Amino acid sequence: MNPFGLYIHWPFCLSKCPYCDFNSHVREKVDQKRWKEALLKELTHASFDAPQGVLSSIFFGGGTPSLMDPETVASLIETAKLLFPTTSYLEVTLEANPSTVEAKKFEAFSKAGVNRLSIGVQSLQDEALSFLGRRHSAKEALKALDIAETYFPRFSFDLIYARPHQTEDGWKAELKEALTYAKGHLSLYQLTIEPQTAFATRFARGETMILEEDPAAFLYELTENMMHEAGLPSYEVSNYAAPSQECQHNLLYWNFENYIGIGPGAHGRITLEGVKHATSCYKAPETWLAAVEKKGHGGEVCVPLSPSERLQEVTLMGLRLTQGLSLKRLYEETSLAPEEAYQGLSLLEKEGLLIQTPTHLVATREGRLRLNSLVSFLLNRI
Ligand code: SF4
């Protein structure tokens, strides 16, 4: 039986971070009871068109899901278990911010059934946290990691690097400290400027907001090497894990498997009658809430993906993985062998950007650094 995932989006944050382009909104007050009922309603509706297979993971993302009532989280987990067949180990991840108030709720989330926490630490330096517009201090972050260690068998945390003026020595020391707190998984993202963010406005005004390309690539190399030496090699462009500690939910995305998405702006990929469909919900929280209360779901789009869209997605997702794109998955989704699907394979192999094994098409480290251009070239878009 194929595994599938469930993504639940909580769209609220206490403030908007200046680099963030997620579907997150600041509201003075959130009616937790009303939101709980709406999410449960949409979850039940989603079960009518569930993909074949077994539920292997639930992921509470946002926004800041650690602002949810633990009781809502517990009800959603329990209801999902009643609605879908599940694997014997059901991974349940919740994204959390490390502020003191939220860290106090970790025990309650653990009791609610969450067994994996993903904590938005972002930096272990106060100056960087203030630049990134975060509300917590480095001290609070470390305290939150200690609390997570007490209540969760698995947890991960995020750091953002390639910040302006960041030096090799500075990042090395920060990552070294982070590794002493790591429990099998870290997500290490390079700072990027996303359109329509406060950082994009400042960048357009000429402010230095990120590290230049060459030093950033150098820090990426350094990161890959340090994580490899620490026994947490990369398994995806920005994700590092000890063996068997990979995030099972995110692996579903990268392997282009099925997942249901509920909550404002949530996306899903669901195979219906043999064809992969893309689903998405209304993005604005209030529009989504009104739709669910009126018709039982906030779904805006459910469309079959065309063969070329499936090829594009399976390629872009699969090549993010260190082990590469499974040729079996490629064939299952597109009925194509790599030579039929792509142009210029041998040229890219000669350039050291791609490797073909009997089972996978693998982007080399160099190739993963240029993934978007690589995929565009493969799919004949350059
Ligand atoms: S807490 Fe996370 S989701 Fe919320 S604004 Fe900051 S980065 Fe975005």
Image (cartoon, rainbow, N blue to C red):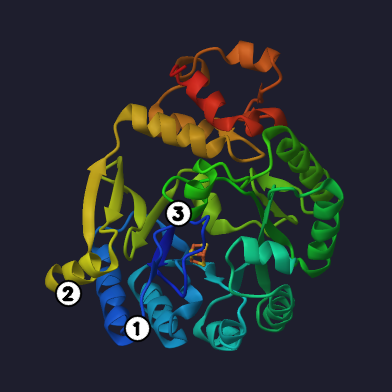
Residue drawn at the location 33% of the way across and 54% of the way down: 51
Do the residues bearing badges 1 and 3 touch, measured as CB atoms within 8 Å?
A: no
Q: What is the quadrant of residue 126 in the picture?
A: bottom right
* Distance Cα–Cα, label 1 vs label 3: 22 Å
> Which amino acid does the dot numbered 1 rest on?
Lys
User: Could you classify mark 2 by the number of other residues whose Cα lies within 10 Å: few (under 14), some (14-19), or many (20 or more)?
Assistant: some
User: Measured from the top left, where is residue 312 in percent x and y?
Assistant: 42, 30
Residue under label 1, please give it. Answer: 29
Q: Nearer the viewer, residue 190 or 49?
A: 190
User: Could you classify mark 3 by the number of other residues whose Cα lies within 10 Å: few (under 14), some (14-19), or many (20 or more)?
Assistant: some
Residue drawn at the location 24% of the way across and 69% of the way down: 286
The mark found on residue 293 in the picture is 2
The mark found on residue 102 in the picture is none
First in sequence: mark 1 vs mark 3: 3
Q: Which structural element holds mark 1?
A: loop
Of tags 1 and 2, the one toward the viewer is 1
Of tags 2 and 3, the one toward the viewer is 3
* Name of the residue lying farthest toward the left: 294
Residue under label 3, please give it. Answer: 21
Q: Which structural element holds mark 2?
A: helix
In the displayed structure image, the side of residue 53 where residue 127 appears, left or right:
right
First in sequence: mark 2 vs mark 3: 3
> Which amino acid does the dot numbered 2 rest on?
Glu
> Which amino acid does the dot numbered 3 rest on?
Asp
